[in-house]
Amino acid sequence: MKVAMVTPMSPESAIADVMVQAIPHLGDEWDVEVWCPTGPDYRPCPVEVFPFAEADSDTQSALAAYDLVIYVLGNSPWHGHILPLARALPGLVVLHDVAMTDMVRASAIERGELDVLARRVADESTPENAEIFRSGRHPEGNPGWMRYCAETPMSDYAIENSLGVVVHSWWHASLVDGRTLGDVTVAPLPVPSPRLGFDSNHHDDAGDHLHGLPDDAVLLVTVGAANANRRIDALLDAVASDPVLASRVHLWSVGPTQRQDADDLHARAAELGLTDRFAVTGAVSDSLLHEILDRADIAAALRDPVLEGQSASVFTQMLAGAPLMVLDHAHYSELPDDVVVKVDPQDVVASLRTALLGLVHHPEERAARGQRGRDFVLSTRSGQAYAEQILEGGRRAIASRPLVLMGTDLAGRLRRLTLNEHRSVTTTVADLAFELFDLE
């Protein structure tokens, strides 16, 4: 079977990295070729890569010649040119993020369809939410925008014409189930490669701080963009709330950070008397990231709200052998209890303090839990295991194709006859289709 995988191929895309890990194993059953939006550079790939400049009719016609098209979608600009293809030509969608709001909005602006999508939001929600979508701004700033994205994820728009969906957690599967006539398949997201291509782009001042840490310092790190949903504020509050933690723990936020966010965090650390024990490193090279993780004693991933379907950075931290603290909700709850330390999302600071004290006072438990986390990643998060579930999703997508095409045709006929505006008609047609074709 000839299959096209449409994915970003930027050297700095972690999503591209994990998709490429699956390709050699997909090749055991499929003849796979990769299509990607045109870019300045592409990551190495074991199969032929076909860049396309526009998601136009020529690109769509070329993809229609394949037996199956796999669209890889995430909430970043790299995926904006893929979305129109996924909506125009039904295929299997690998959905990496729960909230697709930023990408869908940016793609709509580029195609001149922002008002159309804003009206859709108004119909499904409220005029106020439609205006927030149209403007891309929330009255409560970035934290409010993230909550808005969690409540208005726009993932249904991305997948509604799909033959099926692959996601990376059962929690995400529960959110998209029923949003497509195809099946939802859960696949184990691999850990990103040790090198993502950042080494040539950064000068690492943080390296000096790393080598200047006291030998007895307990280094607590959180990895990823230091934005409003990473709860670094709660980590600062928890460390400051206990004299032992305040005297021993050094907290580092490792990853790209906007200046205002960094300034706010530094101001909070100063208020709590933690200036000398807190650092925002900004983006670091691959090599320094792994040097920091090798030194780290504890890691934290405290997303709230959770906008991704699974967290690749979590597995990067676990692979380094650092015991990981997570909020006990969303896909984080699915991680084994003996592998991660789960924090109560309803009482974050107090629960964090208890967890941190246990890890600081018991270094042997830190090491044991960190090793269990590393073993978990090594035993469950491989390109081969990922490919096996994508293959299963592909088999289900092929089986779903007649039903999806029938549903698309019915919807088109109702629109042409303007019968789609009459709820009694659409309900009757849908009920009859479900009865005749066993669509439950």
Image: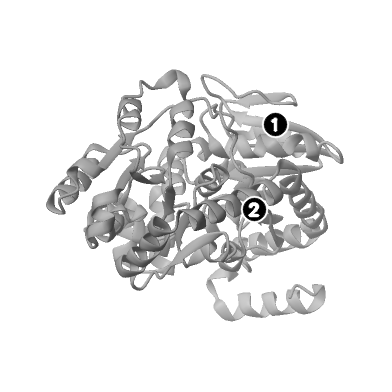
Amino acid at the residue labelled 2: Phe
Residue 438: percent from the left, percent from the top?
80, 75
Q: How many labels does the image show?
A: 2
On screen, residue 113 above or below 38: below
Which residue position holds label 1? 34
On screen, residue 434 above or below 282: below
Q: Quadrant of residue 344?
A: bottom left
Say left or right for 88 vs 350.
right
| Residue sitting nearer the eye, 323 or 43 | 323
On screen, residue 295 above or below 101: above
Say left or right for 6 vs 390.
left
Which residue position holds label 2? 376
The residue at the point 70 percent across, 57 percent down is 164
Q: What element carries label 2?
A: helix
Q: What element carries label 1?
A: strand
| Residue sitting nearer the eye, 308 or 48 | 308
Q: Which callout, 2 or 1, points to the residue nearer the camera? A: 2
The residue at the point 56 percent across, 44 percent down is 83
Marks 2 and 1 sit apart, C-alpha to C-alpha, by 30 Å
Q: Can residue 310 be seen in this view?
A: no
Q: Which of marks 2 and 1 is nearer the N terminus?
A: 1
The residue at the point 24 percent across, 62 percent down is 242
Q: In which quarter of the image is residue 143?
A: bottom left
Amino acid at the residue labelled 1: Val
- Label 1 packing within 10 angstroms: few (<14), some (14-19), many (20+): many
For the C terminus, the quadrant is bottom right
